[in-house]
Amino acid sequence: MHRHFGDFVSGSIATVSVALLFVACETLGGSEEKSGEIAAQIGDDVLTIEELDAQIKDDLFARETNNGNAARLYDLRSKALEDVLADRVLESEAKKAGLSTEEFVEQQFPLTEVSDDEVQRFYAVNAARLRGASLEQVAPDIRRYLQEQGRERAIDAYIDERSTIVLE
């Protein structure tokens, strides 16, 4: 008897998993999602995308705040505030220049050159995390990563010059 119940549960989980995978793929594919869109159905019980999103939001919040830890919550809110203000500064500056934010960033903060030595140093420090990939295999990705890091530092300096954040 337990075996049949297990088969039923396995089959139900597989059916729900396939439905969730289908919904996830549709969402990643760019389709507009509706809050009442069905994510899964077991018998008459319907689970909507909105319900899944609420569960994900609650789980992420609990995990990221260590279940509401005040110090962790403060850190997350501080980081979020910095990010929102940085986005607004860039949007404002882009608007003044008559550009989209992406165009403004590309023009004001071009990717910098990264030397082969910098790529090799990064590879040497992080080789264990690269799962045995050779330098030749990962050098283009490392170079791009280091270029993006340089851009991020330049943007951070630019934002710091134009904004002051006071948290109370």
Image (cartoon, rainbow, N blue to C red):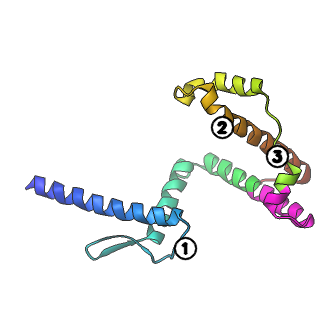
Q: Nearer the viewer, mark 3 or mark 1?
A: 1
Q: Nearer the viewer, mark 2 or mark 3?
A: 2
Q: Looking at the picture, how far across and down is residue 139, in whole percent?
A: 67, 31
| Chief SS of the magenta region | helix
Q: Residues within 10 Å of mark 3 (few under 14, many from 20)?
A: few
Residues shaded magenta: 84-104
* Residue lying at 79% horizontally and 39% vertically, measured from the top left: 150
Q: Residues within 10 Å of mark 1 (few under 14, many from 20)?
A: few
Q: In the drawing, what numbered circle is on residue 141?
A: 2
The amino acid type found where label 1 is placed reads Glu
* In the displayed structure image, the side of residue 123 where residue 22 appears, left or right: left
Mark nearer the N terminus (3 vs 1): 1
* Residue lying at 62% horizontally and 47% vertically, measured from the top left: 72
Which residue is the site of mark 3? 156
Instruction: Tell me if residue 1 is in the magenta stretch.
Output: no
Tell me the distance, in whole angstroms, between the alpha carbons under discs 3 and 1: 34 Å
Secondary element at image label 2 = helix
Q: Looking at the picture, how far across and down is residue 12, in whole percent?
A: 25, 62
* Residue lying at 56% horizontally and 67% vertically, measured from the top left: 30
